[in-house]
Image (tube, rainbow, N blue to C red):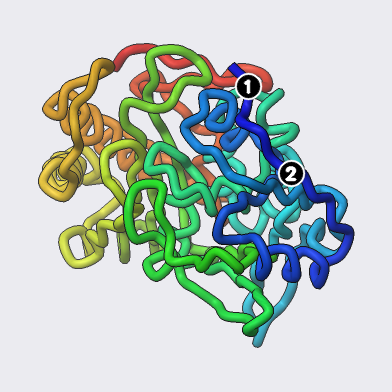
Amino acid sequence: MKPSPLRIHRPTTVDETLDLLAARGDTGKILAGGQSLVPVLNMRLAAPSDLFDITSVVGIDELEVSDADGSEEICVGASVTHRRVERSAEVTRANPLLGEALRFVAHPAVRNRGTTVGSIAHADPNGEMPMVLALTGGRIEARSRRGERTLGAEELNIGPLETSLESDELITRAIFPALSAGSRTGFDELARRSGDYALAGVGMILDVDGETVTGLRCGFVSVTDVPDILDLGEAVSGARLSDASEVAATVAEAARDFIDPGGDIHASADYRRHLAGVIASRLFRRLCRSDGASGRGTAADSRGEDSPVVTTGDDTERRRA
C-alpha cells in the first residue's frame, strides 16, 4: 500500500517549520528519518493532510557534549541519526548507555536514517530511546510560535505512542546528562529475530563506590506502557559486588513485580514478565563483574555466556534465554 494523498513541505529553517506547524500542525506530521512514520503511512494507519520534512532544516543537526553549570550533557539535535550518536566516541565516554542501547535498534540500515529524537517523539513502548531518556534523567526542548519549553521524560510520555506535545510543537533537541564516574551501565533485550522489537528489554545503571553498591536504577522495553523507572537503591545499597548472585535474585523479583506487561501473538504476559526478570538478574551480575577500570560504562563490552544477547559485528544476534 501507499500513503493517502498528502502535501509535503520542506522547510529550511526552524522558524519556517514553526509557521507550518502553527497553520497545519493539527492535521500534519513531522518527518525526520521516517523509519517509524513511513511504514505507518504506507499501511494507512495514519492519514495526515500534510507532511513536514525537516531533514533540510538548519540548526537541528548538532551532536555535542557540552558543559552546563559544571556538568556535562549530550545534546542531540532533531535531525541527528541514531548511527551518528552510536558511533560518537564523546557520547560513549559521557553516557555509554546511549551507544549500548542504540546497537539494539533495528538494523544498521534503519539506524543510518532513523533519528534519536524522532524515536523519542514516537513514544513507542517497544523503543529503546524513550527508555534511555527516562533512565538517565534526560529531557527534551520543544518550540512553537507560542514559545519554548523543556520537558523531562516523565512529563513527555503520557501513554503508548502518546506524548504531551502540542500539535504546533517541534522537538528541537534531546539532552542526556553525562553519567558519574562511579556508574556502570548495561542494556540487554531478547527478540525472536535480529532487528525485531524486543519481547522484553532492560537498561540498568549501577552506582558503586569501591566494592560497594550505592545505587541501582532499571528501565524497561516492551513490558511497560511508558518508560517508568524502577529505583532499587534502597533495596541494594550497601551490598558487596561479590554478593551479586544473591542480590540478583532480589533484582529479578523486583523487576517482575514492577512491570505489568501485556500479552500478544509473540509472547504471553507471563513470559514477558519472566524474561524481564531473567534479563535484569543477568545484567546485574554482569555489571557487578565489571572491574570498573575505565569508569563510566565499563560493562559495555563485558557480555558473558549467561547473557541472553550476543553482540557480533555491526548488528545484534539474539538467542533464547
Secondary element at tag 2: strand
Secondary element at tag 1: loop
**Residue 62, x across and y down, in percent:** 81, 60
User: Between 308 and 262, which is closer to the camera in this rendering?
Assistant: 262
Q: Quadrant of residue 141?
A: bottom right
Q: Quadrant of residue 234?
A: bottom left
Please give the residue where the numbered disc 1 appears in the rendered image.
2
Point 47% across, 42% down: residue: 128
Q: Quadrant of residue 83?
A: top right
Mark 1 belongs to which amino acid? Lys
The residues tagged by marks 1 and 2 sit, at their Cα atoms, a distance apart of 14 Å
User: Between 288 and 315, which is closer to the camera in this rendering?
Assistant: 315
- Say if residue 213 shows up in the picture: yes
Q: Quadrant of the N terminus?
A: top right
Q: Quadrant of the C terminus?
A: top left
Point 30% across, 56% down: residue: 228
- Say if residue 89 shows up in the picture: no
Numbered disc total: 2
**Residue 104, x across and y down, in percent:** 53, 30
Counting residues from the start of the chain, the first of labels 1 and 2 encountered is 1
Point out the residue furthest to the bottom here.
69
**Residue 248, x across and y down, in percent:** 20, 41
Counting other residues with Cα less than 10 Å from the Cα at mark 2, is it few (<14), some (14-19), or many (20 or more)? few
Looking at the image, residue 106 sits to the left or right of residue 321; the answer is right
Mark 2 belongs to which amino acid? Arg
Counting other residues with Cα less than 10 Å from the Cα at mark 1, is it few (<14), some (14-19), or many (20 or more)? few
Note whether 72 is above or below 108 in the view shown.
Answer: below
Note whether 84 is above or below 314 in the view shown.
Answer: below
Please give the residue where the numbered disc 2 appears in the rendered image.
7
**Residue 158, x across and y down, in percent:** 34, 60
User: Between 249 and 133, which is closer to the camera in this rendering?
Assistant: 133
Point 67% across, 54% down: residue: 93
